[in-house]
Image: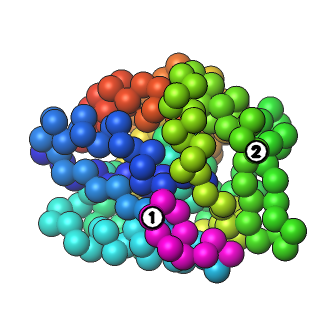
């Protein structure tokens, strides 16, 4: 079958794929879901982390695989998989952006905000005093990320979220047409997303055409609310 590498977004860890990973494995795929530095069980301090650290972590996983992988990035991980697509293009068969940012060459996440105005993150995100990390208020987790999940799932998630380094969305990517640009891209839009609104997702797809573009009528986190449907879509992209 195929090898999938699943990259989590801001504040999250590899744990967010716990419901999807076994479903893909049941279809015969190899599935790898690493913690990015400072997330999940990784002990690094978020204030010390850069985008290069994220990309190197992805690269360390890619270099251990025996075949080019389907690299999936959720949310802010769109930045990470874009740079990884440039740096490790020979190790990747396809990029899949799951309601994720797609910056162009020389752009950072903060440069690609068209249609972002309705994001709940503006209301619930809080920066540390030194400005190096940010968190999401507990009361904002469900309406921002998990609007279609039950309260038990949200409570489980809240205990696992971690501070996010603010330097990541401020760091531009560097890509070229013959490396990142040559990779097939797919996009999974989440129509009820309140973290990255649909208009922002559509902006990414219009600037960097993806084929196919799949619509899921879910919140920002279909890996928790609709894991079987998400696994089915990912399986279909092999």
Quarter where residue 32 is shown = bottom left
Question: Does the stretch in magenta take in 44?
Answer: yes
**Secondary structure under badge 2?**
loop
Residue 209, horizontal then vertical, whole percent: 52, 42
Whether 83 is drawn above or below 200: the answer is below
Q: Which residue is drawn at 45% across and 64% down?
A: 41
Q: Which residue is drawn at 84% across and 73% down?
A: 130
Residue 123, horizontal then vertical, whole percent: 84, 40
Overall secondary structure of the magenta section: loop
Question: Does the stretch in magenta take in 29?
Answer: no
CA gap between label 2 and label 1 equals 21 Å
Q: Nearer the viewer, residue 25 or 68?
A: 25
Q: How is the image coloured?
A: rainbow
Residue 55 visible at all: no
Q: What is the magenta range?
A: 38-47
| Disc assigned to residue 41 | 1
Classify residue 191 as left or right of residue 120: left
């Amino acid at each position: 079958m195929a090898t999938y590498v699943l990259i989590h977004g801001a504040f999250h860890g590899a744990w967010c794929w716990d419901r999807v990973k076994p479903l893909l494995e049941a279809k015969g795929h190899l599935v790898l879901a690493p913690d990015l530095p400072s997330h999940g069980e990784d002990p690094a301090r978020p204030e010390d982390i850069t985008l290069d650290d994220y990309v190197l972590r992805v690269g360390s996983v890619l270099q251990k695989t025996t075949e080019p992988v389907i690299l999936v990035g959720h949310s802010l991980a769109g930045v990470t998989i874009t740079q990884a697509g440039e740096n490790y293009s020979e190790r990747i068969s396809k990029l899949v952006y799951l309601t994720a940012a797609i910056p162009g060459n020389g752009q950072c996440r903060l440069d690609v905000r068209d249609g972002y105005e309705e994001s709940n993150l503006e209301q619930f995100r809080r920066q540390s005093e030194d400005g190096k990390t940010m968190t999401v208020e507990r009361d904002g987790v469900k309406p921002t990320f998990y609007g279609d999940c039950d309260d038990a799932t949200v409570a489980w998630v809240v205990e696992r979220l971690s501070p996010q380094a603010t330097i990541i969305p401020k760091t531009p990517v560097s890509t070229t047409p013959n490396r990142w640009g040559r990779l097939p891209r797919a996009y999974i839009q989440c129509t009820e997303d309140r973290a990255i609104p649909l208009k922002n997702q559509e902006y990414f797809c219009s600037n960097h055409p993806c084929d196919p573009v799949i619509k899921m009528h879910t919140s920002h986190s279909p890996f928790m609310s609709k894991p079987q449907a998400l696994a089915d879509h990912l399986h279909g992209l092999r």
